[in-house]
Image: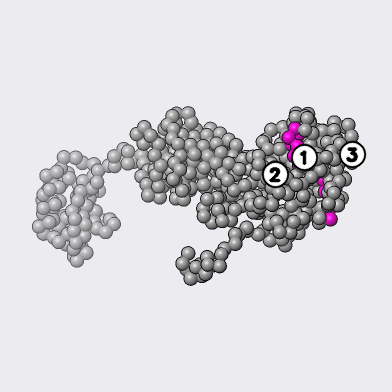
Amino acid sequence: MIHFDNPAPVKLKGAGGGFWITIDPSHPEEVLIEEIDKLIKNLKHLAVNADVTLDLGDAKGHEDLIRTIKSHLEKNFELGKISTSPQKRSVPTERIRQRDLSRGWNHHRSDVLMLRGRVRAGQKINARKHLVITGDVNPGAELVAGGDVIILGKLSGDVHAGFPDNDDAIIFSLGFNPSHVRIGARIAAGSDDSQGTAPEYAAVEGAQIVVRDYMKEGPFRRLPWPEAI
Amino acid sequence: MEGKIIVVTSGKGGVGKTTATSSIGAALALEGKRVAIVDMDIGLRNLDVVMGLENRIVFNIVDVVQGRCKIDQAAIRDRRIDNLFLIPASQSDNKDVLTTSGVERVCNDLRKKFDYVLMDSPAGIEKGFQNSIVGANEALVVCTPDVSAVRDADRVIGLLYARSLEPRLIVNRIEPSRVERGEMLSHEDVMEVLSIELAGLVPMDEKVLISSNTGTPLVLQNESKAGQAFRRIAKRLNGETDVPIEIPTHKTSMWNKISKTFGLK
C-alpha cells in the first residue's frame, strides 16, 4: 500500500561529510526508530564515524524524541557526531551575508579626491571628503580633508583630517613625518625623532592623537567585510 | 634664431643667485655665445658690483622698460669677456615701477639681440620675482643644502611649474666634509624633496667671496672649484649632453685612505 499523502516517516540523504536524517515527528517513536535503524543498517560500513544531523523540520517541542533517538543511535551504531539541524540564522548574520553578497560598493558614489604627484611647499589642498595622494607631500605643504587622508608616499607638512569635527578620520602614509597633525578637533605636533620609514597611521584614541604602525595594528583589519566609505 | 631667457631664482636670499647668474653668464659667453645678464633686483642692485662694472652704469633696466633708452644703450660690455653684457638694475626705484607687460615686451626684444639672457631674480615670490619670470623660457633654481633654503626652493618650484616653466636645480655651496660628517644635507637629500632635473652641483669655495668683492669673473680662475662647476653647468645649458654631473668630494688624507682600504673606518 502506498501512502501518497503520508510520506515516509524518515528520510536519509548525504550532506557534506555525513548524513542528514529528516524525521516526521507525527509518527510514533517506535516506528521512527525502527525506520532509522533500517536505513542506517543499509549503509553498512558507510555509517561508521559519519556525522549525523537530525532534522525535525519546523516542528517544535520534540526535545524528548530527539534525546531518545540520539541515545538510541549512540548505543547501537558507531556514528560520528550526532547533532540537530541548526536553527534559522540570526538576523544580523543574515544581514551581513546579504550585504556581502549585494556588493553595495558597486553603486557607491564616492567623494574621494585622488591626486598624484608631489605636493610642494606653499601648496594647499582642500578635499571635501577623503583625500588620496599618490606621491610625496613636502614640508610646508598643507592638506585639509573632511575625511581620511591617505598618502602613498612620504608625508611631511601640515595635515588636517576629519575637518572640522570628525574624530573618526585617520591619516595614513608610507613615510609618516608631518610637522603638524590635526584630526577633527584634536591637534598634535609632529615629533622630531620620527624617521618616517614604515607605513604608519594617526588616529584619535581617547582624547589624543596616536600614531601606530600600520602593518602591525592596521585600523581596519577587524572589519567583517569591505565597506564603501 | 631667437635666444633663450633663463631666470635664476631661489626664493630664499643669500643662496648664491647673483654669483650663479654672473658665473653662468660669463661661462656661456666663453662658449662663444652672445650673453646678456639682467639684474632684476630693482632697488638692491649688486650684480654690477659682482661683475666689476658698477662705475660704467649710465642707464638701467627700468629705463629700458619705461622707454627712456634702448637696450643697446643700457647694456654694458664686459671688460674681460667678449660678448658678455650687463643690464643693471636701478638702485633708486622699487620693484613696483616695472609692469609685467613692459618686462615681457623688453624680453621679446632681448631674445632677438642675444643668444642667452640670464635674469637675476630678487629673493621672495612677490612682484620682483613675478616680473623676472614673466618672459623666461627656462628656469634655474639655486638652493643651498639647508632646510630653509630647500623649503623656499620648493615653493618657488611650485610657482614656476604653475607658469609652465620646468625648472632645473643648482645645489650651491656643498661642503663635502660636512656632508660626510652628517652636519649638512647631502645633494641627494635636497633632490629627494625637490625632485627636479639637476643642472649641477657647486662646492663651497672661498674664492667666490674674493671674486665678488674684486669684480673678477670666477669662471676665469682655473683653480676655483665653484668656477669650474659653473662652467660645466653653462656647457649643459648650452646643449652639451656629455658633461657629467660631478659630485663634490673633499680631499681625504693618505692615512684615511689606507684606513678605509683596511676597513678600519
Query: Of callouts 1 and 3, which one flags the residue occurring earlier in the amino acid sequence?
Result: 1
Tell me if residue B236 is in the magenta stretch: no
Camera-side residue of B68 and B159: B68
Q: Is residue A187 visible?
A: yes
Q: How is the image coloured?
A: one colour
Q: Position of residue A100 (x, y in %)?
A: 40, 44
**Distance CA(mark 2)–CA(mark 1):** 11 Å
Label 1 lies in what chain?
B
Query: Of callouts 2 and 1, which one flags the residue occurring earlier in the amino acid sequence?
Result: 2
Same chain letter for marks 1 and 3 = yes
Question: Which corner quadrant of the image does residue B234 belong to?
Answer: bottom right
Amino acid type at mark 3: Gln
Whether the residues at callouts 3 and 2 have beta carbons within 8 Å, the answer is no
Determine crowd level at label 2: few under 14, some 14-19, many 20+ residues with C-alpha closer than 10 A. many
Q: Is residue A79 above or below residue B91?
A: below
* Label placed on residue B39: 1
Residue at x 67%, y 36% (from the top left corner): B124
* Label placed on residue B73: 3
Amino acid type at mark 2: Lys
Camera-side residue of A22 and A173: A173
Residue range corresponding to the magenta coloring: B32-47
Q: Position of residue B40 (x, y in %)?
A: 76, 38
Camera-side residue of B140 and B70: B70
Q: Main secondary structure of the magenta part?
A: loop
Amino acid type at mark 1: Asp
Determine crowd level at label 1: few under 14, some 14-19, many 20+ residues with C-alpha closer than 10 A. many
**Distance CA(mark 3)–CA(mark 2):** 25 Å
* Label placed on residue B17: 2
Same chain letter for marks 3 and 2 = yes
Whether the residues at callouts 2 and 1 have beta carbons within 8 Å, the answer is no
